[in-house]
């Protein structure tokens, strides 16, 4: 198979799945609206059941719902019949996913899923299946054609299931008024959460270099060299006068023959950019990028608190 044939096959597979997604979009109607409203008003959690490829889809839908404010739990059909049915409480809603709607494991479970929950939503490609007939609400995931050339591997059908799960999650987010700050609460360890909630104080260096305006050049060089940031802060009576960077020192050495009388005040870059320690780290990154600088002076109530470095923020996923 040559490269053009490979691309042609890929394009064909994607075209088939895109067409099935368009078909899904066109047939969304009352049953979808009822599902969204029922899940939104549910006093318990949403239990999502599946087996085979549908189990993988169910697991992903649960992950999306949990991270967007809809408490959900995955239940594998094969495990449910051997004790895991106990996870379902009467106030819960069950979303059962099965393309055929007649898988033996699913069929065996249906009476219990119906009895133990407050409502059963069936996501199936066959509304006349046993799942379709017993469900309180049916979400139709019928596809005309699988992308698999042998028409065997679930491809278009699982894509449609996944997309429908995403649509449910998005609509529920809107109903709940779920915002980015809410999303961050469920992602505190990732870069998404950090960018939405992390404050400058979390990333301030332990090293806090400073000199006075009257400090000699030797003390300035020692302070800059020991700071690990190539910068020191000039402080006068607890007030920030300015900063001196290793670049300032190099420029001074190039322009001065006698440096014995040079004081910190002589080479200070005044009015440095600052940020309060309580501000968001992403705001610090914005300032660093806007002014093309590597460090930012951090303050607390207007007083020198420390230094935040662009490399530290990048390493932590702040963008």
Image (cartoon, rainbow, N blue to C red):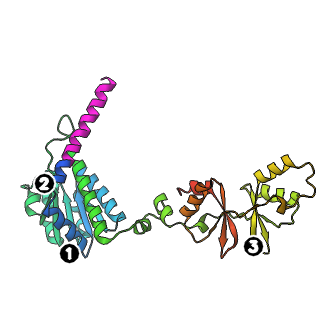
Residue 237: x %, y % from top left: 79, 75
Distance, label 2 to label 1, CA atoms, is 23 Å
Q: What secondary structure predominates along the stretch shown in magenta?
A: helix
Sooner in the amino-acid sequence: mark 2 or mark 3: 2
| Residue interval drawn in magenta | 1-21
Q: Residue 101 — which label? A: 2
Number of residues whose C-alpha sits closer than 10 Å to that of mark 2, classed few (under 14), some (14–19) or many (20 or more): many
Most foreground residue, 236 or 191: 236
**Residue annotated with mark 1:** 90
Q: Residue 295 — which label? A: none
Sooner in the amino-acid sequence: mark 1 or mark 3: 1
Relative to 302, residue 27 above or below: above
State if disc 3 and disc 2 touch (CB < 8 Å). Answer: no
Name which residue lies at 20% across and 70% down.
37
In this view, the mark in front (2 or 3): 3
Name which residue lies at 61% across and 57% down.
288
Relative to 118, residue 160 above or below: above
Name which residue lies at 61% across and 70% down.
277
Name which residue lies at 25% across and 67% down.
46
Most foreground residue, 41 or 295: 295
Residue 176: x %, y % from top left: 31, 71
**Residue annotated with mark 3:** 239
Residue 296: x %, y % from top left: 66, 61
Distance, label 1 to label 3, CA atoms, is 64 Å
Distance, label 2 to label 3, CA atoms, is 72 Å
């Amino acid at each position: 198979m040559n490269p053009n044939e490979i691309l042609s096959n890929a394009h064909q597979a994607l075209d088939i799945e895109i067409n099935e997604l368009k078909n899904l979009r066109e047939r969304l109607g009352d049953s979808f609206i009822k599902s969204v409203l029922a899940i939104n008003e549910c006093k318990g959690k949403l239990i999502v059941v599946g087996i085979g490829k549908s189990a993988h889809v169910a697991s992903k839908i649960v992950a999306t719902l949990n991270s967007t404010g809809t408490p959900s739990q995955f239940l594998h059909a094969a495990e449910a019949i051997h004790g895991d049915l106990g996870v379902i409480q009467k106030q819960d809603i069950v979303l059962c996913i099965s393309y055929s709607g007649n898988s033996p494991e699913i069929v065996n479970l249906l009476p219990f899923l119906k009895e133990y929950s407050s409502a059963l939503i069936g996501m199936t490609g066959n509304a006349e299946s046993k799942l379709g007939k017993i469900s309180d609400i049916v979400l139709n995931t019928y596809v005309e054609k699988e992308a698999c050339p042998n028409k065997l591997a679930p491809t278009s059908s699982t894509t449609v299931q996944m997309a429908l799960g995403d649509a449910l999650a998005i609509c529920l987010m809107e109903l709940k008024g779920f915002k980015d700050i809410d999303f961050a609460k469920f992602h505190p360890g990732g870069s998404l959460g950090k960018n939405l909630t992390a404050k400058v104080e979390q990333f301030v260096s332990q090293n806090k270099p400073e000199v006075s305006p009257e400090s000699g050049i030797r003390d300035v060089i020692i302070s800059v060299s020991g700071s690990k940031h190539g910068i020191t802060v000039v402080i006068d009576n607890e007030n920030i006068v300015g900063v001196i960077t290793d670049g300032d020192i190099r420029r001074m050495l190039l322009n001065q023959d006698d440096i014995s009388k040079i004081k910190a005040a002589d080479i200070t870059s005044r009015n440095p950019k600052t940020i309060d320690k309580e501000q968001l780290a992403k705001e610090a990154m914005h300032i660093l990028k806007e002014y093309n600088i590597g460090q930012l002076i951090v303050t607390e109530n207007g007083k020198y608190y420390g230094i935040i470095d662009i490399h530290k923020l990048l390493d932590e996923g702040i963008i």
